[in-house]
């Protein structure tokens, strides 16, 4: 009986320990999932793709572009940010052009004028939103743009290293572990930023060769290595130029973790080797674009743990496979790519393969899903001449969204991995995954479960002007100070902001377009000891991606002369047409909406002083004078309001009523009156008196000396793309030269399954290519090319 009871106790104890063990394992992996989901909820990821009309420009040309903003999880157009910032940067990350682009339903477009002062070279075009500034600049959209200035001598090339390339090594999973066979990937890049073919050998400190390697595609490849504890390893690499480069491999760890991924057809087998650490539990966590796809636990037995992932469980695109230890610390990570099944299929053809000069070209378009069903899509299209100077731009929205946007650095010929599905391309694709680092976020911060803190708000309704207020008095507080930013002009644009504990200011604007002058100030009658600085909204963080080296070869000179002549002719003969802008359709009403009453002063007998106008014609006020200063008391059906109203002249607050009385009434067109207490953001106003002058120039009112007046560019005005029409024989025979190399650009070719566009050839013969990019509301992206000749 005793033996039976003893056996029962042992069984119960074993069962309880097993249950506790399983609960502990389940708790760890559940905590990781909960932390990840919490992060995902608070850290929405935006992706941007910018379609430019071409990639090489001369001074005086216009760079046209369309911006696509999508949800990073499902690639559907995202209507969150209403502003995208776009910059053209040089090698020193100094901007030669910046713009703020209005976005609607995840789409926006604009243009950049290439200034005449640019130097020859490659530049970086980058785009991001205010919300994206909270995350790494490695995930801003970036593209290389070449600018050629024929009136500037190309800068002499600086002396470079003995070899014209560099190489990096990436152990699978992140670590080299002694005694464990590991796959080591490598990536060799030339000065142009593109991969170079290399061969090489790995030697140890005794100069014994332990491995050999050879690049496959784009300077990438891999080899197997079983490092020995205490040994050091070096790669001797030979490039296509025959020069040898020596490079140290990453350090070999005597204890830690090593990961190996094996593709077994429908399944992925993940093997983790452990050395120098007691056997325990490991946790595998896989996610695709921040959506959890797999989470498993495995015991470590004899220094090895195994995980299995069904490929069908993973989402399309890049998946992150991360291994955690018992302490919830990430110890290994590996990327895996699954080719997407859904794609926007675009068909585009010209009605002829060859055209004469100044002839009409008709393009028929159709958009279909992968299943062949006609679908609606938003497309952008450019048609330009290709030659030795301007090649075909092969960057596509499909390859960018599914591949490049989830990886750091520049991906060479990303379209290759989608057009080819053979064994070689699969190996090349895996090499690309192996040469990537850790995730776009830091696991250590994510697992702390702290509330996410973001420095930049999404611009959901319009551009946010940012500023900072400081006190001019020692020890003065900068918190809860109400400030005003106004835009002088006939349209009332006034915005308010209350400073936080650090003195930061945010002015949420509406329909704020074009170049402007803005005035920032406090109510100097109340707060006179402050200074306001308006801050730049452009990001001051930069990716580590280097701009490729630029070289102007002799073979490009003839093409450059032809392009330069074409640009000069276009600017001389079509300059007025090129400089046309669309007026934005905006709500021109003031922030207070419809006023209680509007006084148009031309409807009344004119007085010579503003005091007489206000006393005799305006029934909603009482003008008083105390201690030698004028004051306006606002009257409504309940009596007088407390204090002076917010008095505005051409959108600028004027807090000294004496300055209002000094305005010449003959300069004022109208007065709008709000006779009730008005709450505008953080400010509480005793009514509003808004004066509008005929010229919108403040009618001679002097601004307060402490007010900050600066030039500030609002959202970019839309430039009109110019393309001449040759419908008649008279137009076709016109002696006006037409040297356009960009025949057509449209950021908004919308299809309901089918669409048609037309344009005319110019006086420039040659081969022309059309490039179309687009996306559907369901996030299906696609691109297409077509070509024709002009004789």
Image: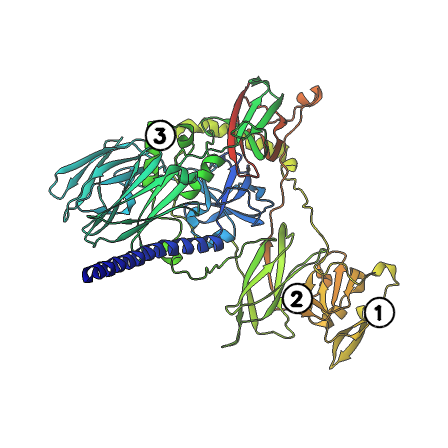
C-beta proximity under 8 Å, tags 2 and 3: no
Q: Quadrant of the C terminus?
A: top right
> Looking at the image, which residue is at 43% across and 40% down?
315
- Nearer-N-terminus badge (2/3): 3
Residue density around tag 2, few if under 14, some if 14–19, many if 20 or more, within 10 Å: some
Q: What element carries label 3?
A: helix
* Residue 786 higher or lower than 67, as above or below: above
Q: Quadrant of residue 419?
A: top left
State the residue in front, 416 or 466.
416
Q: State the residue at coordinates (29%, 51%).
A: 282
Local crowd size for mark 1, using a 10 Å CA cut-off: few (<14), some (14–19), many (≥20):
few
Residue 205 in the figure: left or right of residue 317: left
Identify the secondary structure beneath mark 1.
Answer: loop
Q: Secondary structure beneath disc 2?
A: loop
Within-10-Å neighbours for mark 3: few <14, some 14–19, many 20+: some
In the drawing, what numbered circle is on residue 703?
A: 2
């Amino acid at each position: 009986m005793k033996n039976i009871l003893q056996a029962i106790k042992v069984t119960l104890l074993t069962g309880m320990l097993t249950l506790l063990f399983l609960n502990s394992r389940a708790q760890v992996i559940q905590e990781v999932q909960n932390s990840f989901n919490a992060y995902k909820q608070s850290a929405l990821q935006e992706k941007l793709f910018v379609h430019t009309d071409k990639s090489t420009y001369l001074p005086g040309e216009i760079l046209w572009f369309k911006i696509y903003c999508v949800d990073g999880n499902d690639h559907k157009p995202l209507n969150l940010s209403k502003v995208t910032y776009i910059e053209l940067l040089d090698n020193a990350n100094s901007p030669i052009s910046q713009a703020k682009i209005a976005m609607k339903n995840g789409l926006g477009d604009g243009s950049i004028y290439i200034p005449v002062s640019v130097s020859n070279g490659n530049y970086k075009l980058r785009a991001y939103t205010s919300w994206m500034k909270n995350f790494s600049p490695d995930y801003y959209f970036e593209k290389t743009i070449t600018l050629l200035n024929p009136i500037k001598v190309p800068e002499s090339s600086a002396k470079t290293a003995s070899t014209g390339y560099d190489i990096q090594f990436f152990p699978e999973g992140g670590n080299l572990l002694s005694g464990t066979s590991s796959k080591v990937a490598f990536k060799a890049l030339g000065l142009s930023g593109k991969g170079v073919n290399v061969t090489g050998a790995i030697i140890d400190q005794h100069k014994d060769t332990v491995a050999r390697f050879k690049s496959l595609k784009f300077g990438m490849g891999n080899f197997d290595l079983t490092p020995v504890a205490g040994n050091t390893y070096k790669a001797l690499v030979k490039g296509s130029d025959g020069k040898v480069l020596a490079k140290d491999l990453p350090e070999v760890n005597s204890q830690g973790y090593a990961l190996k991924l094996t593709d077994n057809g429908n399944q992925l087998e993940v093997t983790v080797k452990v050395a120098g650490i007691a056997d325990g539990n490991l946790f595998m966590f896989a996610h695709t674009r921040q959506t959890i796809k797999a989470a498993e636990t495995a015991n470590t037995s004899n220094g090895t743990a195994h995980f299995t992932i069904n490929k069908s469980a993973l989402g399309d695109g890049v998946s992150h496979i991360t291994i955690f230890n018992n302490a919830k610390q990430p110890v290994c990570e590996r990327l895996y790519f699954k080719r997407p099944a859904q794609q926007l299929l675009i068909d585009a053809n010209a009605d002829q393969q060859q055209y004469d000069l100044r002839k009409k070209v008709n393009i028929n378009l159709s958009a279909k899903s992968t299943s062949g069903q006609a679908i609606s899509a938003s497309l952008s299209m450019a048609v330009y001449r290709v030659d030795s100077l301007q090649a075909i731009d092969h960057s596509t929205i499909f390859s960018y969204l599914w591949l490049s946007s989830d990886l750091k650095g520049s991906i060479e010929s990303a379209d290759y991995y989608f057009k080819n599905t053979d064994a070689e391309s699969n190996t090349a694709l895996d090499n690309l995954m192996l040469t990537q680092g850790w995730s776009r976020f830091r696991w250590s911060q994510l697992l702390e479960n702290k509330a996410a803190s973001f420095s930049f708000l999404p611009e959901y309704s319009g551009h946010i002007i940012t500023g900072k207020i400081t006190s001019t008095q020692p020890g003065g507080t900068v918190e809860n100070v109400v400030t005003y930013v106004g835009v002088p002009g006939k349209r009332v644009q006034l915005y308010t902001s209350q400073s936080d504990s650090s003195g930061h200011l945010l002015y949420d604007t509406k329909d704020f377009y074009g170049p402007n002058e803005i005035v920032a100030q406090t109510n100097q009658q109340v707060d006179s000891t402050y200074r306001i600085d308006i801050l730049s909204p452009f990001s001051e963080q930069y990716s580590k991606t280097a701009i490729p080296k630029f070289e102007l070869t002799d073979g490009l000179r003839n093409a450059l002369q032809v392009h330069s002549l074409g640009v000069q002719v276009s600017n001389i003969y079509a300059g007025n047409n090129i400089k046309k802008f669309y007026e934005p359709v905006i709500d021109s009403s003031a922030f207070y909406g419809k006023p209680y009453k509007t006084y148009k002063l031309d409807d009344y007998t004119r007085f010579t002083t503003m005091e007489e106008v206000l006393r005799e014609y305006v029934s909603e006020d009482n003008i008083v004078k105390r201690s030698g200063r004028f004051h306006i008391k606002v009257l409504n059906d309940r009596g007088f309001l407390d204090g002076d109203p917010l008095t505005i002249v051409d959108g600028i607050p004027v807090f000294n009523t004496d300055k209002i009385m000094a305005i010449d009434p003959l300069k004022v067109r109208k007065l709008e009156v709000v006779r009730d207490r008005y709450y505008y953001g953080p400010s509480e106003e005793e009514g509003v008196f808004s004066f509008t002058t005929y010229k919108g120039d403040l009618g001679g009112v002097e601004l307060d000396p402490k007010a900050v007046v600066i030039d500030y560019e609002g959202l970019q005005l839309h430039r009109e793309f110019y393309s001449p029409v040759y419908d008649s024989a008279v137009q076709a025979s016109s002696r006006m030269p037409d040297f356009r190399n960009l025949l057509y650009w449209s950021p908004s070719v919308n299809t309901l399954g089918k669409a048609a566009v037309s344009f005319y050839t110019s006086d420039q013969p040659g081969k022309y290519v059309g490039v179309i990019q687009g996306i559907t509301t369901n996030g299906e992206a696609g691109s297409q090319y077509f070509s024709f000749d002009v004789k």
